[in-house]
Amino acid sequence: MFQNIHSILIGLTEEGDNEESVSALAYGLSLARETGAHVTVQAASLKLVLTHAFVSSVAKGLVAAENRRLDALANAVVDTARQSAAASGLACTTQAPQLAYADLIRSFTTLARSHDLTVLDAEPVALAIDRGLIEAVLIDSGRPLIVVPPGRETFAARRIVVAWDGSAKAARALNDALPFLRECEQVDLVSITGEKDLTHMASGAEIAPHLSRHGVRVSVLNLPAINGDVAETLRNHATLTHADMIVMGAYVHSRLRQMVLGGTTQSLLKSCPVPLFLSY
């Protein structure tokens, strides 16, 4: 039984894009069934706002109609979530607010602070609304986050890859993920060599006894970076070992540096074969 996970927030945004992949809802409900946690589903629709004072009544009518459409879609999502939770015997709270972008981000971030973790859909586009939500919840909520790629609708934690570079953020992610690591059949504690100097950081061999004392079955691995790319090395290892999750500390380098130059967090947010557990 997973310990210390009693409340899960599933965050969804409704922007009217029918092609947008949604896996977080099914994954989050699956996770709640495994943990026995209370689940909160917030499906927020983005409120369109006309900022120019001199707009035609036709434009106002079109915006109002689109806002009504988005609100209806968000309410349909929470109705589905409520029915799915009830069918599984889960305690579930639902919300479907319609908010302007800044208020939407603030609402999700504030709500995340009163939950043990948040589950969100992956968003490969760096400037998209959902990517902004991922980064805001990650950086400002003080809680861990699971980012779910398309097609991953069932929670599993038989094998987990932990990205370890000895940093404070890696240590926080490691401890935040302990409820999953304790129940896992195999944890690969992976340090990637050749990308940066790790000689002054706590090694995987040094942190492994800490995990063992928590009952975690852990193997320590040092893998050379594939073409100097840490993210690609982690993706490759997760795929080859059929891992169910990658755990890592986010934005070890500054977020601005990663936005400009790229980095492991940005790369894995763009593309990851398995759910990505992140702490900041």
Image: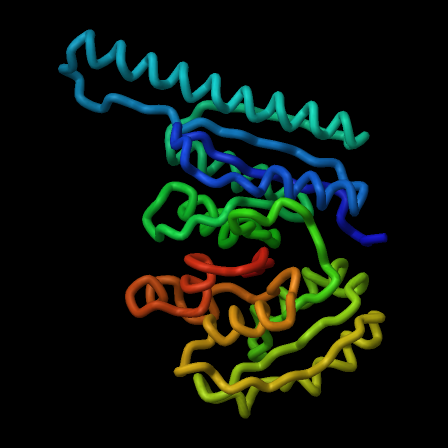
Relative to 133, does residue 58 appear above or below in the rendering?
Answer: above
**Residue lying farthest top?**
57
Q: Residue at x 68, y 75 (%)?
A: 188
Which of the colour schemes (rainbow, by chain, secondary structure, one colour) is used? rainbow
Q: Residue at x 43, y 32 (%)?
A: 103
Left or right placement of residue 181 versus residue 228 in this view: right
Relative to 162, does residue 54 appear above or below in the rendering?
Answer: above
Residue 33 x/y as whole percent: 77, 41
Residue 173 x/y as whole percent: 62, 64
Tell me the quadrant of the picture where the C terminus can be found.
bottom right
Left or right placement of residue 12 versus residue 46 in this view: right
Q: Nearer the viewer, residue 106 or 124?
A: 124
Q: Residue at x 45, y 58 (%)?
A: 269
Relative to 58, does residue 121 appear above or below in the rendering?
Answer: below
Q: Nearer the viewer, residue 266 or 169?
A: 266
**Residue lying farthest bottom?**
199
Residue 252 x/y as whole percent: 47, 70
Left or right placement of residue 175 versus residue 237 in this view: right
Residue 78 x/y as whole percent: 59, 25
- The number of numbered discs placed on residues in the rendered structure image is 0
Q: Nearer the viewer, residue 21 or 101?
A: 21
Relative to 154, does residue 237 appear above or below in the rendering?
Answer: below
Q: Residue at x 57, y 66 (%)?
A: 248
Quarter occupied by residue 59: top left
